[in-house]
Image (cartoon, grey):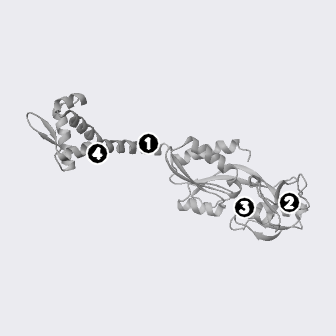
Amino acid sequence: MDPRRFEAFLVVAEELHFARAAARLHVAPSALSQQIRRLEAELGAPLFRRSSRRVELTAAGRALQERAPGVLEAIAEAGRSTRAAAAGQEGRLTVAFAGSITYGLMPALVRAFRESHPRVEVGIRGEQVTADQVEGLLDGVVDVGFLRPPVGSPHIVLEHLRVDQLVAVLPEDHPLASLERVPLEGLAGDPFITYPSTAGASTLAAVMGACLDAGFSPRVVQEGRESHTIVGLVAAGIGVALVPAPLRQLRMPGVVYRPLVPPVPEVPLAIAWRRAGVSPLIERFVDLARHVVGSSPD
């Protein structure tokens, strides 16, 4: 239905006089009468009783007079919401984060986006490994992911954001915990806790490569799919681990984080989204992410 007909109806209902209503609306009385008749035809009921002396609302007209303002407001709100969604200012966005940045970058980025886009509902999936994020992106349940490459799917756009150094996670009573920097070869005899090859493939490859460069192959005794699980296993005294430096934001009793003696292995961080159907909302989030990552120390 044309909202202008509702507006015309409300003016006639207030004036109860077609000529005066037409003057207020700056239209000819005949054009106004035609609008009302079309509205009555659409609704299937007469809205006015007309005579040569007076115009009166019918029962249907009185009912519409009560509801028409709400209808007009709903139409206006639908228009505002549609325009806001088209401009990337309203809607819902689901974002996934690798475990190592869930505790650092994620709060800063989400806070900044919520402040600049208060009408957008942001859903968070933290502690998600690359394999799970890729699956979520392809299935459409994740809109944007922050993950560790590589990603093999041609249906996902990948943009490099930065590289993160690996740091050692040690039990607080470890013999090397008092050092300012830990030589990686000094951990050759320790049991290692790593990501599984099916989940944190890029970080695991960096750990294995760095250990081989240091002259040993790590003895892996336990795997942890989530970063907080790996740190928890270190706190339990099961072994040591190498993790991306931003994970230092995760504070846990019984563990210490120590930088490594150069050369320090690194892992890339990228932002990812589906190649098809990129919305203005995703574009706005990606733009903000570039700015926040560029100004963030972790």
Task: Give the Cα distance between marks 2 and 3.
Answer: 16 Å
- Look at mark 4 in the image and give the residue it sits on: 67
CB within 8 Å, label 2 to label 3 = no
Question: Which residue in the protein does label 3 denote?
Answer: 228
Residue 72 to residue 121: above or below: above
- Residue annotated with mark 1: 83
Res. 172 mark: 2
Numbered disc in front, either 1 or 3: 3
Q: Amino acid at mark 3?
A: His
Q: Measuring 67% from the left and 57% from the top, which residue is drawn there? A: 98
Say whether residue 248 is left or right of residue 149: right
Query: Depth check: 102 or 207 in front?
Result: 102
- Earlier-in-chain disc, 1 versus 4: 4
Could you tell me which secondary element the residue under label 4 belongs to? helix
Q: Secondary structure at mark 3?
A: helix
- Which of the two marks, 1 or 4, is nearer to us in this view? 4
Q: Earlier in the sequence, mark 2 or mark 3?
A: 2
Residue at point 23% right, 46% down? 63
The x and y percentages for residue 65 are 25, 42
Instruction: Identify which amino acid the numbered label 4 is placed on.
Output: Arg
The first of marks 2 and 1 along the sequence is: 1
- Please state which of residues 139 and 156 is positioned toward the viewer in this rendering: 139
Which residue, as the protein is rendered here, is positioned at the far bottom? 221
Discs 4, 2 touching: Cβ within 8 Å: no
Mark with earlier residue (4, 2) = 4
For marks 2 and 3, give the one nearer the viewer.
Answer: 2
* Residue 54: mark: none
Camera-near label (2 vs 1) is 2
